[in-house]
Amino acid sequence: MKRNSIAIVGAAETTKLGKIPELSQISLHADAALNAMTDCGLKPSDIDGVACSMEWPTHIAHYLGITPKWVDGTSVGGCSFMLHVRHAAAAINAGLCETVLITHGESGKSLIGKFRPPVLPTHLQGQFELPYGPMGPPTLFTIPVLRYMKDMGLTHEQLANIAVVQREWAAAHPRASFRDPITVEDVLNSRMIAYPFHLLECCLVTDGGGALILTSAERAKDFQTKPVYIRGTGESVETPMISQMESFTSSRAFRVSGRQAFESAGIQHSDVDHLMIYDAFAHLPIFGLEDLGFVKPGEAGDFIWERNTAPGGKLPMNTNGGGLSYMHSGMYGMYALQESVRQMRGTSPAQVEGATLSVCHGVGGMFGASGTIVMTNDPSSS
Amino acid sequence: MSNPFKPLPEATPETKPFWEATQKDELHIQQCNDCASHYFPPRPFCPSCGSRNVAWKKASGKATLFSYVINHLKNPSYDGPYSIAVVQLEEGPRMMSNIVNCDQTPEALILDMPLEVTFERMSDDINLPQFQPAKQ
């Protein structure tokens, strides 16, 4: 993809975040989509491409009254939206469509009209993982961490500290679910969920949604919003089974996706002003920082402890508070993208002054997939 | 009564030899006749080289504890907190297991400790492989 040839011109979250029992999952998609269209002055009839996950593009296009000539239903978990951005950019560049709407909505807490494809007893996961009694991501996504701690020397306090730092960022965000300061002791004293993980090291469970609208950089100049340019992208998948991950100290999908994004963007790590790393659980930023190459293997725990990613640090990370404090409907990637867009527009409540380059890195499943988007507000910098 | 948090597996044609071997309290995995690599979970070709020239063989049943969590969420199939682990078989592949017949505590569950296979009877058809501390 040609750098900065595509721009995000519309971006919005659902009107409410948190507990939204009055809306079903598909209406959360629609609420976010209508807000994104309002943001950039478009109507459903102006959209000719639709991408979404969990709901089929068929459902979303029909519900919103859109007649698309390009759709993408890529569904690889919470980073699906990063892949949608990448695919949409390629489609617009190829002339398949002009204006793409990417939607997310999830009734993660209220469970109204929520659909997730089931794991059947005949699937490999159904035969070789579920009989061992896992109870969802808190008991699976977390399994690699004791191996990481032994091999890399990460401490329980350093793991807990990740939630503490992200709460500092959340304090600035009026829409964050949890904003009160916490300490390492608070985290370590919170209820044990799956040793070594305590409640405050696990993501929230909320309702919400978000949407993005992309078009060519040339057309973006005609919109009322400040364009946020797509400078580089990456994606990959590894395995649906955490037990079959190649390594428990590094994610192959993270490394492949991150490398493609940095190479296609033509950037160095020192160019990055703002970073989002999908944090369903406290260890995700550790893996992300190392697998994207911001620090060497084994250094991320110290790097965060030394406040490099905290407010005032040299690498502001997860500035909305992340899935640990901002919100997490189940597929958090859309909210990470929204915060990167806000930072590039200069409108985040936790704005990083003068930021021109943001890296937004997502995970799907449990280290099963990854997508990475590099955004900039300065298209002349390539 | 079925528990959605410990569902009964159902064999497919590709995995049937695995589940049939467990009926004799044996753990069988596959090996590629071309590149010699052992692999799991079962499939009718080698995930390392793509060869269909593969064979089933009996594993030693020896493993080490690679990583785990101790689940504190209530599960009606377990009596209190329980380990959900990934073990590394002597032959190389990894698989999920509970670590059974020992305390479910960080003090008792030490990474890299030697383990051996045992079996948990779930139904007439399913004799689930489990791992316990090795008896030397």
Image: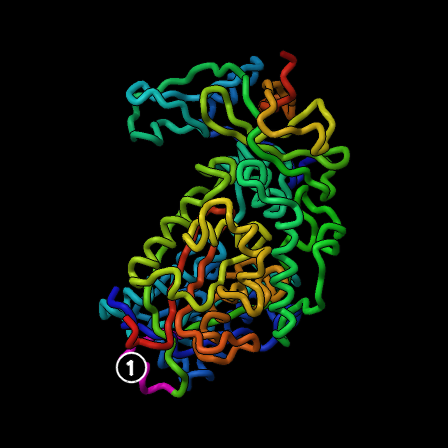
* Residue at 62 percent of width and 50 percent of height: A158
| Residue A204 lies in quadrant | bottom right
Q: Residue at x 45, y 48 (%)?
A: A296
Magenta stretch encompasses residue A217: yes
Location of residue A376 in the rendering, given as x and y in whole percent from the top left corner:
37, 72
Q: Which residue is labeled 1 in the image?
A: A219
Residue A145 screen position, x and y as percent: 58, 42
The residue most toward the left is A94
Secondary structure, mark 1, is helix
Q: Residues within 10 Å of mark 1 (few under 14, many from 20)?
A: some
Q: Whole-percent x and y of residue A165?
A: 62, 61
Between residue A193 and residue A353, name the one nearer to us.
Answer: A353
Residue A92 image point, x, y percent: 28, 70
Label 1 chain ID: A
Q: Residue at x 49, y 65 (%)?
A: A314
Is residue A107 something that shows in the picture? Answer: no
Q: Read off the magenta span.
A: A213-223
Quadrant the C terminus of chain A occupies: bottom left
Q: Is residue A133 visible?
A: yes
| Magenta-drawn stretch contains A367 | no
